[in-house]
Image (cartoon, grey):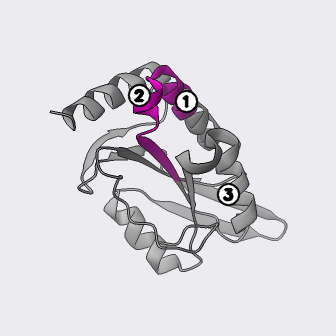
């Protein structure tokens, strides 16, 4: 899938020795997405800076019609700054469905006159540098629990 900022293909695999957090959502989400992004930001803040630098967060938009590349990139950067967050966007529904299926995620967007109704799964997947999903957190997982799991997974990569 393409990076919303550069258009370069995103591979859902962490950098060597790192982790990639993958979340499917959208910028106008009133609750699940901003809460999850904030919890991830807090969790990364609880890690040693060197460990936090080994974790990248990818937000894959499920609402590409409203989530323009500029809007999505700014949203992700607002939580994680440049470099630690990746905004991922495709306008190809089949490509989005394939990637969602790989992560056991789902979404739907229904437009009714002047309203848009979006539903989506709210699971964060943590992927290692081999492309293996190591853990999935349901919505509501605390930042403390996230940080705990990230420390364990990052330390496993060192052994």
Query: What is the crowding at mark 2: few (fewer than 14 residues within 10 Å), some, or many (at least 20)?
Result: some
| Secondary structure beneath label 1 | helix
Task: Tell which circle, 2 or 3, labels the residue nearer the N-terminal end.
Answer: 3
Q: Which residue is mark 3?
A: 73
Q: Which residue is mark 1?
A: 39
Q: Residue at x 56, y 32 (%)?
A: 41
Q: CA–CA distance between discs 3 and 1? A: 19 Å
Task: Tell which circle, 3 or 1, labels the residue nearer the N-terminal end.
Answer: 1
Q: CA–CA distance between discs 2 and 1? A: 8 Å
Q: Tell me if residue 7 comes above or below residue 40 in the rendering.
A: below
Whole-percent x and y of residue 78? 70, 43
Mark whose residue sits in front, 3 or 1: 3
Residue 29 can be seen, yes or no:
no
Whole-percent x and y of residue 98? 38, 72
- Look at the image and give the residue range highlighted in magenta: 39-58
Q: Is residue 13 found inside the magenta-colored segment of the image? A: no
- Along the line of sight, which residue is nearer the eye, 33 or 128? 128
Query: What is the crowding at mark 1: few (fewer than 14 residues within 10 Å), some, or many (at least 20)?
Result: many
Q: Tell me if residue 77 comes above or below residue 137 in the rendering.
A: below
- Along the line of sight, which residue is nearer the eye, 104 or 44? 44
| Quadrant of the rendering where the C terminus is positioned | top left
């Amino acid at each position: 899938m393409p990076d919303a900022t550069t258009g370069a293909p995103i591979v859902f695999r962490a950098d060597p020795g790192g982790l990639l957090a993958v979340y499917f959502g959208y910028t106008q989400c009133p609750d699940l997405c901003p809460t999850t992004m904030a919890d991830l930001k807090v969790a990364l803040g609880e890690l040693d800076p060197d460990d936090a630098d080994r974790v990248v967060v990818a937000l894959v938009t499920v609402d590409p019609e409203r989530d323009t590349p500029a809007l999505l990139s700014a949203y992700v950067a607002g939580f994680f700054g440049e470099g630690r967050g990746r905004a991922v966007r495709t306008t190809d529904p089949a490509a989005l469905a394939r990637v969602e299926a790989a992560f056991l995620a789902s979404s739907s967007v229904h437009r009714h006159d002047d309203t848009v109704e979006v539903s989506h799964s709210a699971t964060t997947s943590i992927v290692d540098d081999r492309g293996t999903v190591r853990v999935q957190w349901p919505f509501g997982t605390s930042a403390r629990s996230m940080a705990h799991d990230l420390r364990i997974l990052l330390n496993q990569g060192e052994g």
